[in-house]
Image (cartoon, helix red, strand yellow):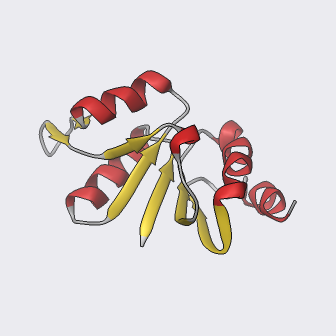
Amino acid sequence: MKTTIVGAGAIGGLAGAYMTRTGHDVTLTDRWVEHVDKMKEDGLFIDGVRGDMTIPVAAAHPSELESPLDMVLIATKSQHAVEAVGQLVPLMTAETAVVSFQNGFNEPAIIASLNA
């Protein structure tokens, strides 16, 4: 299963890097052009209690994503979630799963954008 993580910041980036490291097929995408370009060139740098590491990841600009999307994990800032999902709807099928990494407030709006 191919997983697309929308929002490659602290939560999405970390999840995507560790999922990639364990062998999952993950593509990270973000609206921040320079961040996507940097991930494409150098991988994703992570620092923290487990030490510093750079993990090679697959990254794509939103316009580079291709249909069909199998699994979409939403890890954007809350105020950008509905817009991000809305842009991906044309790449989704009836079998696409969408999961939000957020606090629960966006789910009704995300579901509405999927059903629009």
Corner quadrant of residue 81: top right
Check the image and report above or below for 98 versus 39: below
The quarter holding residue 116 reads bottom right
- Is residue 87 shown left or right of residue 37? right
27 is higher (above) or lower (below) than 24: above
Q: Nearer the viewer, residue 50 or 85?
A: 85
The x, y position of residue 57, in whole percent, is 28, 46
Count every numbered label the image shows and give the total: 0
In this view, which residue lies farthest toward the top? 34
Q: Quadrant of residue 20?
A: bottom left
Identity of the residue furthest to the right in this view: 116
Please state if 45 lies on the left or on the right of 82 as rendered: left
Q: Residue at the spot x=51%, y=27% of the render?
A: 32
Please provide percent x and percent y for residue 64: 52, 42
The quarter in which the N terminus is drawn is bottom left
Residue 44, x across and y down, in percent: 27, 37
**Residue sitting at 55 percent across and 32 percent down?**
31
Q: Residue at x 40, y 39 (%)?
A: 10
Out of 54 and 78, give the one closest to the viewer: 54
Residue 80, position as x, y percentages in the image: 68, 38
| Residue at the spot 66% in from the left edge and 52% down from the top edge | 88
* Left or right position of 100 against 115: left
Q: Is residue 111 above or below residue 41?
A: below
Judged left or right of residue 93, residue 75 is: left
